[in-house]
Amino acid sequence: MAPISYFQGAVLGLLQGVSELFPVSSLGHSVILPSLLGWNIHQDQTYFLTFLVALHLATALVLLGFFWSDWVRIIKGLGRSLRDREIGDPDAKLGWLLIIGTIPAGILGLLLQDKLRNLFASPEYASIFLALNGLLLFGAEALRRRAPVVAEDDDERIAKTVGWGQAATVGGAQAIALIPGFSRSGAAMGGGLLVGLSHKDAARFAFLLATPIILAAAVLKLPDLAGSQGNGVRGPALVGALCSALSAYFAVRFLMKYFETRTLIPFAIYCLCAGTACAIYFAVT
């Protein structure tokens, strides 16, 4: 039998597309749900991490497509900056902010990704960390800075609000998502709130930051899916990727509208309650 069925691949794909973008930890949910449902999936095995590569790649491509016009502006701004040897406009600055934010998360990911995922890839650990992720979101809301609106354009506001060191800190915070239960988008959004971004701009900055990191990590691991480690999971991975892309598209559309007027508090409550309940369940069963 295949280690992951097509039905399981579809369910995990739909879950990943939503939970990767919602600040609730996609990896944590991918570890917890199979155990709750009694699926015989070993999340600490290589084939499961290989399967997740396809799901993450699909999510990254959806983010790239959704913010395509932003990326075109950013790349053109970087080109002007390199040509003129100065950072003369908000698009150029935002581009360099994203580069600075990507570097620490990328380095930490390469160094710690497999170690942390294998060490904590158990539903018990993931449940505890999911609850802690809720506390992290509560903390970000409690400590957030309220900065005045400095521009009407979304990307220009981000470029004018975020400093160079702050971009590195927010980007580095994403590395916490290497531990199942902690959310990449939650950490980045929380960091954005702490440096003075609005909820909408914090979400936008988090999604822009996440795109190259998720895409690069998936592309680096893609040969594993094509090789022997992908045996038995390629078909379910393809189905899961399509489902992940579908749910990610609707998730990012919803969240960009949601954060115009709402906060992280509902997600914090969910993570704290769900994580605590699951931790208790796994402790007594």
Image: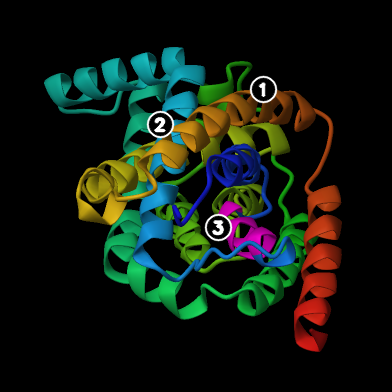
**Is the image coloured rainbow, by chain, by secondary structure, or in one colour?**
rainbow
- Answer yes or no: do the residues labelled 2 and 3 have beta carbons within 8 Å? no
Q: Residue at x 35, y 22 (%)?
A: 74
Residue type, mark 1 in image? Arg
- Callout 1 secondary element: helix
- Answer yes or no: do the residues labelled 3 and 1 have beta carbons within 8 Å? no
Going from N to C along the chain, the mark reached first, 3 or 1, is 3
Quadrant containing the N terminus is: bottom left
Q: CA distance from mark 2 to mark 1?
A: 22 Å
Going from N to C along the chain, the mark reached first, 2 or 3, is 3
Q: Residue at x 38, y 47 (%)?
A: 53
Residue placed under numbered mark 3 in the picture: 27
Residue placed under numbered mark 1 in the picture: 253
The span picked out in magenta is 26-34
Q: What x and y, as percent, mark residue 219?
A: 27, 41
Q: Nearer the viewer, residue 42 or 188?
A: 42
Query: Residue 270, relative to residue 45: is it above or below?
Result: above
